[in-house]
Image: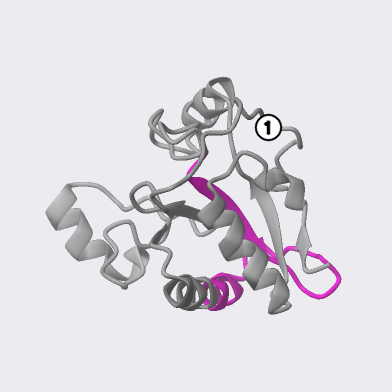
Amino acid sequence: MTIRFKERLEGVHPDLVRLFTELEKDKVHILIVEGVRTTARQRQLVQAGASRTMASKHLIQPTGFGHAVDVVPTNSKGQINWEDITGFRKLRQTILDKAEKLGIRVRHGADWDMNNIIDELEVREYIKRVGRRPFVDYPHWELVGNGSVAVPKPKAAKPKAKPITKKK
């Protein structure tokens, strides 16, 4: 299997599930780190500085689904190299290409303004415009808007699998 911890997509918007399922069909090696979060988990991440907002798309949205997933590239053995920025960038382009082909609008955590320039590459201009360094979150992918119009509301979803934490 090319997607590890697929159960972490439970409660995630069907458009994102479809996107990552299609990537699996293409044999793209990824690991789902986290999908839907509880408010308590989000608060924990904000306090730790791993997230900047309590309005996270990982929380259940008005559609009844989480609208964000954290995904990392793996090698064929399922191993993660958190420092492999090139791997994250290749995965980024693969996801963007597949999302465009499927007609799914997504935002990447390394390009919050969606200008197709990775925020770390435009740091000086960003600091001048916003007044702080950009928050670059390579694993983060979120749905733009509410996705497909005719989406049934599921029963309240609760995260089942524990998230992967970055080893220090």
Any magenta on residue 107? no
Left or right of 77? Residue 141 is left
Q: Position of residue 163 (x, y in %)?
A: 70, 40
Q: Which quadrant of the structure image shows residue 36?
A: top right
Estimate the x, y position of residue 48 in percent, counting from the top left: 53, 31
**Residue 104, position as x, y percentages in the image:** 43, 64
The part of the chain drawn in magenta is 66-91
In front of the other: 81 or 56: 56
Instruction: Specify whether residue 82 is painted magenta.
Output: yes
Question: Looking at the image, is 96 positioned above or below residue 53?
Answer: below
> Label 1's element?
loop
| 121 or 14: nearer the viewer | 14
Does 36 sit above or below residue 18? Answer: above
Residue drawn 50% across the image and 53% down it: 140
Q: Is residue 69 above or below residue 120?
A: above
Q: Which residue is mark 1?
A: 159
Q: Is residue 85 left or right of residue 77?
A: left
In front here: 130 or 99? 99
On-image quarter of the N terminus? bottom right
- The quarter of the picture where residue 18 lies is bottom right
Amino acid at the residue labelled 1 = Pro
